[in-house]
Image: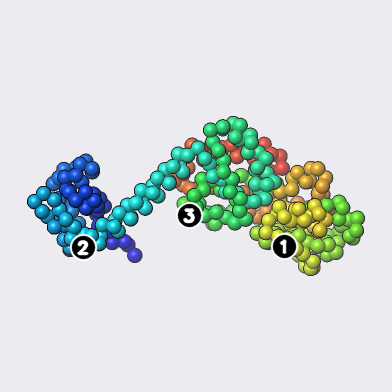
Amino acid sequence: MARRLPPLNSLRAFEAAARHGNFRKAADELCVTHSAISHQIKLLEDYLEVELFHRRARAVELTQAGSYYLPILQTAFDRIADGTEQLVSTATSSELTVQVYTTFAISWLSSRLPEFQKQHPKLRVRLNMATWDVDLNREVVDVAIGTVNCIEDFDPDIYYQQLFTSNIFPVYSPKLLQDDPPLEKYDDLTQHTILRVDTWPNDWTLWLNEVGIPQIALQKDLIFDTYALAIEAALDSIGVAMTRTPFGARELSSGWLVTPFDKVIKARDSWYVMMRNDRRNSDKINIFAEWLQGVVSQDPSLEL
């Protein structure tokens, strides 16, 4: 339902006049004439169908209705002023708040941020890590980095810039095979503990379907809330983890983790840098987004 709100100019005139106890002082504060204040208050009284002031020769006094209404308006105006101050200070601040999935921050972004700070020393990045998607319309975040399954999932209030699409494949520690059965055939996975991630619950299913053994019974498993924990468990030789680029890149390049099979599949979701439409012209956001696009384009392990 539409809100029933009196004219804003009339509300401002009443609040100023009630606070000063004088129409002329209210006029001076709002940079209008004394008659304009009187006119706006009369409009408000007609709208509300109540008298808000007792008019005296040299001053005005609030009626019972006016005394009731004044603190309500002052609270509302204070909240608007506070919210505006916070919004403006956030938009113009040298601090850039970036929300990102925990594993992406640990595995890829955090090691590259010093270069961003070197290039842009006047900007300070505040990195918020989470396992869930941020609501940019509700939370005070400048930029978010995350995954979206398809265009139909786009929020019309959010601007999306595609970064890359992950590859998905299993990994394990070479130490795992010292005591456990071999990993030479897809069916050998049934003899090992499977490390799953509940925020991407379909990655194992997608990979198994792609290699042609969707019916394989992977009965022994452990579930983690992030890929970072699943990769750590794989490093500890607890089992076989499914990973996705760029997660685990350092562990793979060092040989701490290896992949048992050559089969790599494309994820169904893609990675995006996201911002509210009304923040697209923010200099600090565009500086970070352009830098991020450039770093992604130079990483050979990431595919657009």
- Disc number lying in front (3 or 2): 2
Assign a secondary structure to mark 3. Answer: loop
Q: State left or right for residue 38 relative to residue 113.
A: left
Looking at the rendered structure, the kind of residue marked 3 is Arg
Q: Are marks 2 and 1 in contact (CB under 8 Å)?
A: no
User: How far, Cα to Cα, is label 2 from label 1?
Assistant: 61 Å
266 versus 110 height, above or below: below
Query: Which residue was labeled with disc 1?
Result: 223
User: How far, Cα to Cα, is label 3 from label 2?
Assistant: 35 Å
From the top left corner, tell me how far across and down residue 144 is, in percent.
56, 48
16 and 299: which is toward the camera: 16
Q: State left or right for residue 143 relative to residue 173.
A: left
- The circle on residue 136 is none
Kindly identify the residue that appears in the image at 68 percent across and 44 percent down. Answer: 108
Query: Which residue was labeled with disc 3?
Result: 138
Looking at the rendered structure, the kind of residue marked 2 is Ala
User: How far, Cα to Cα, is label 1 from label 3?
Assistant: 30 Å
Q: Earlier in the sequence, mark 1 or mark 3?
A: 3
From the top left corner, tell me how far across and down residue 272 is, in percent.
58, 47
273 and 270: which is toward the camera: 273
From the top left corner, tell me how far across and down residue 26 is, in percent.
20, 46
Query: Which residue was labeled with disc 2?
Result: 65
Q: Earlier in the sequence, mark 3 or mark 2?
A: 2
Q: Quadrant of residue 217?
A: bottom right
Q: Earlier in the sequence, mark 2 or mark 1?
A: 2
